[in-house]
Amino acid sequence: MSDTICDFEEAAVANHEAKATSLANRLDNMQIELDELIERHEADKAVYEIISDGEQWTPQAKSRNVPAALAKKVAAMKKAVA
């Protein structure tokens, strides 16, 4: 959405009315879709709470564990490029 907002602002400043209107419509559609996704997510959390005996869903942090061999390989690539 942020890219589309920037594009809209650029079109508005450049006085490209047709492009700005098109981008405004796209933003409206994106907002509708976002609202629907948020509503669905809230419903999914409610179902999770029911099936997990009252436990509330919380996002899990992704593990950043990288195997040592891969870390060495990436470090070597970075060194070669630098």
Image (spheres, rainbow, N blue to C red):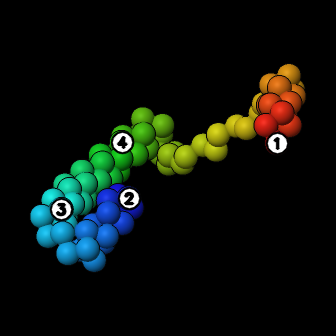
Q: Please report whichever mark, 2 or 1, sits nearer to the chain's N-terminal start.
A: 2
Name which of mark 4 and mark 3 comes first in the sequence.
3
How far apart are the alpha carbons under marks 2 and 1? Answer: 31 Å
Tell me the element at label 3.
helix
Amino acid at dot 1: Ala
Residue 78 vertical placement versus 43 (above, below): above
- Where 49 sits versus 68, above or below? below
Residue that label 4 marks: 44
Q: Dot 4, crowdedness within 10 Å: few (<14), some or many (≥20)? A: few
> How many angstroms separate mark 2 from mark 4 (CA)?
29 Å
Work out whether mark 1 precedes mark 3 in sequence or the reverse, and give the earlier one. 3
Q: How far apart are marks 3 and 2 (CA)?
A: 14 Å
Q: Residue 19: which numbered mark, if any?
A: 3
Q: Name the residue under label 2.
A: 3
Q: Which of marks 2 and 4 is nearer the N terminus?
A: 2
Residue marked by disc 1: 82
10 Å crowding of disc 3: few (<14), some (14-19), many (20+): some
| Residue 31 position (above or below residue 16) | above
Q: Nearer the viewer, mark 2 or mark 4?
A: 2
Marks 4 and 1, the one that precedes in the sequence = 4
